[in-house]
Image: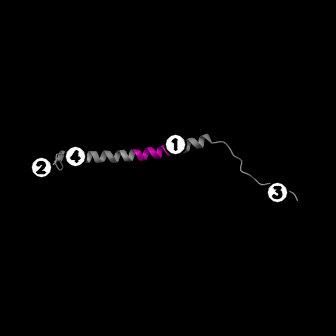
Amino acid sequence: MAGHKVAHATLKGPSVVKELCIGMVLALAAGSLWKMHHWNEQRKVRAFYDMLDKGEISVVAEEE
């Protein structure tokens, strides 16, 4: 009986181009999420100061 040859996956080193592409995609995704968070915080601050200028709110506590 002759032994059958089994095809094994050969291990290769890391692909530099693939690693760069994955890194860029992850960096863009994280940067986009951070930027959207920053815009949301800016919108909240701008709305607060607009309401303060219009006199709708006050930062001074009312005396009872």
Residue under pointer 4? 50
**In this rendering, would 64 be left or right of 26?**
left
Nearer to us: label 1 or label 2 = 2
Nearer to us: label 4 or label 2 = 2
**In this rendering, would 60 be left or right of 37?**
left
Residue under pointer 2? 63
Nearest to N terminus: mark 1 or mark 2: 1
Q: Which mark is residue 4?
A: 3
Q: Which mark is residue 24?
A: 1
Nearest to N terminus: mark 3 or mark 4: 3
Given the image, on which type of amino acid does mark 4 rest? Asp
Nearest to N terminus: mark 3 or mark 2: 3
Callout 2: 10 Å neighbours few (<14), some, many (20+)?
few
Q: Is residue 48 magenta?
A: no
Given the image, on which type of amino acid does mark 3 rest? His
Q: Which residues are magenta?
A: 23-34
Q: How far apart, in angstroms, are the residues tagged by discs 3 and 4?
A: 78 Å
Nearest to N terminus: mark 4 or mark 2: 4
Q: Is residue 33 magenta?
A: yes
Q: Quadrant of the N terminus?
A: bottom right
Q: Secondary structure at mark 3?
A: loop
